[in-house]
Amino acid sequence: MPSSFYQALNSMKNQDVLSVKNYDAGASVTEAYTDFEHLEKDTQVVSRSYNTSGNEKDYTRGNASLEASIDASVIGNSHIDWQSRDLLPDQMGRRAFYSRAADAMTGVFNIEKFIQLWSNSTLKKSAGQEWLPCG
């Protein structure tokens, strides 16, 4: 192999990205790690849509949700964000954002995060959890 091949191979940067969207809940979560020397992670994502019976969807509030449990040990860069938005567009065709949050970190660190986004506001807050209603 030519030396340029090995130079290109050595200059490649590590990257691990997970992005999940639940359109029924109006929620999305992104977890990204770049330029890392060490990465151990355990990420569990549960995305629930509206119940369907036959050809019709059950639009009962609270059926749709997006939950992410993130546990990671990192030496490098990390970016974790989530957002919640309105399910229905306004007269201009845009959907309002209820909230957005982003965490960007560089260095040696551990992450423990649980994000729970539901399509209603009846869920009670649990200790140690970030929660935001989506509707």
Image: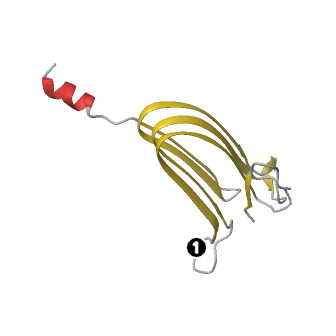
- Quick check: 34 above or below 85? above
Query: Considering depth in this image, is 110 or 54 the residue closer to the camera?
Result: 110
Q: Which residue lies at the image location 76% right of the left edge and 53% below the top edge?
A: 64
Residue behind mark 1: 94
Q: Which colour scheme appears in the figure?
A: secondary structure
Quadrant of image for the N terminus: top left
Q: SS for tag 1? A: loop
From the top left corner, tell me how far across and down residue 69 is, in percent. 68, 41
Question: Residue sitting at 22 percent across and 32 percent down?
Answer: 8
Lateral position of residue 44 relative to residue 13, left or right: right
Query: Which three-letter amino acid code belongs to the residue tagged 1?
Result: Arg
Q: Position of residue 48 (x, y in %)?
A: 74, 46
For label 1, the crowd category at 10 Å Cα-Cα, with few meaning under 14, some 14 to 19 and many 20 or more, is: few
Count all numbered tags in the image, as a single digit.
Answer: 1
109 lies above or below 104: above
Rendering quarter of residue 102: bottom right
Quadrant that contains the C terminus: bottom right
The residue closer to the viewer here, 50 or 54, is 50
- Rendered location of residue 43, percent (x, y): 62, 36
The residue sitting at 39% across, 35% down in the picture is: 14
Q: Residue furthest front?
A: 108
The outermost residue toward the top is 1
